[in-house]
Image: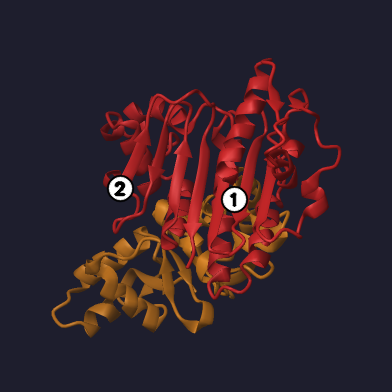
Amino acid sequence: MNEAEELRLRPFMSANEGWGRASGREVYGALVEFVESRAGKVIFRISLSGVKRVDVSFASETIVELARRYRGQKGFCFMDLEDKDMEENWAAAAERSKQPLMNWAGGRSRILGPQPSQGVADAFHFALAKGPTRAADYAASVKEMSITNASTKFKQLWDGGFLLRRERAAESGGVEFVYVPIR
Amino acid sequence: MTDAIVRLLSLFNQLDCCTRRVILDFESKESDLLGYLNRIGFFDNLAPNVEVLPSRPEISGAKLHRGRNRGVVEIARINKNARDQNLPGRLTRAIESACANRSDASELTGAAWTIFAELIGNVFDHSDTPIDGLAALQVYPKGNCLKVAVSDSGRGLLDTLRPSLKTEHPRLAQLSDMELLVQVFRQGISRHGSNRGCGLKSSAEKAIKFRAELDVRLPYVRVLLVPGKQGYAPNTAFCYRDLPLIWGTHLCFTFELD
């Protein structure tokens, strides 16, 4: 099943420039409805096509708040956020709300907002490079890394909104988590 | 100069709102101030009851000359009852055309737009202004200076912020007006909690990239923030206290451009 869907922001806005908390809140309500109506979708790829500019207040009240609301369950990332000035505004909003957002524009990955702490940064980059991955995979790739330690790092990344995770049956019986980059 | 004119305009409109009789006398023949004010839209935004001597200009010079001045000056009313979604964009377009030859035109325009958007948004969200606010911009004829100003006639930024400090930010409650203002623009402080207040902080960060000074006039205080190596800081700020009352928050960023 395809778990990702494009979310174009412009149709939710009344003009191509979004500013102010009040107009952000209006857009947010409609965005939540959209997300709720796509029950099976886990990752929403935000397209800013047609959006000229947004200020930090508007950014805070819309996509950043959406990502915060669904943290751990659904992920939101940008695919075409090229403009440096706008990237700064989205990053400032994400930083303020302590909600990281990935930007994949131009085929490069950048984290807008809070960065993973030094202790888990390596695990995060491993997950980005590998795609869906398990703590056991990461533990096996790093010298003297226990599965428990790797598991703790991935859980921190999931709690922090950097990765998503899903459960699946482990070969040994039980349940294991597969951690997924937000892309 | 536009920032001073906008503050005066706010003051005259405030006095008029308080039912004071205001007369502006331009009868001295040695000055063309009336002509200048007319060209920049002063009278378009002046309360109708304010008396102008010898008389109000019959035709708005701002509407007549718009786009034909060497320097660009725009004063726009912020209608407190109806958000004009296009206002920041309209103001910024004037900068776009005036600074089109600069290599950093796009960054400059983006910074000015964000500042207008955040500051005008604050007029709606926080000011409690009883009369319309004003937004203004000025690009000097040589293109080497840009002023971006927003004014309201509400309670003033610190008066709306201070009551919440004891509960939201107790460590800041003892700061002087100047120190607190510096923190507002450095950290972003809001009466609505720690995940708010990013608008002023982000505006300041955009402006600091261009080494812009920030002039803040509050009801009895004026603070001038000059960017140093650490951005806006108390040791590079100037504070003028016990000034005559002008209600509201009047902010002006001055970009000194190369």
Looking at the picture, how far across and down is residue B37, in whole percent?
A: 70, 41
Residue farthest to the front, as pictured: B30
The foreground one among B159 and B219 is B219
Q: Is residue B107 left or right of residue B176?
A: right
Looking at the picture, how far across and down is residue B138, in whole percent?
A: 61, 53
**Residue at mark 1 to residue at mark 2: CA–CA distance:** 27 Å
Question: Which part of the image, by quadrant, shows the N terminus of chain A?
Answer: bottom right
The chain ID associated with circle 2 is B
The residue depicted at 24 percent of the width and 84 percent of the height is A141
Residue at image mark 2: B236
**Which mark sits nearer the N-terminus, 1 or 2?**
1
> Toward which corner of the image does residue A34 lie, by quadrant?
bottom right
Q: Does residue A37 appear in this view? A: no
Q: Which chain is orange?
A: A
Looking at the picture, how far across and down is residue B127, in whole percent?
A: 56, 32
Residue at image mark 1: B117
Element class at badge 2: helix
The foreground one among B176 and B201 is B176
Q: Which chain is red?
A: B
Which of discs 1 and 2 lies nearer the camera? The answer is 2
> Toward which corner of the image does residue B4 lie, by quadrant?
top right
Looking at the picture, how far across and down is residue B247, in whole percent?
A: 54, 26
Which colour scheme appears in the figure?
by chain
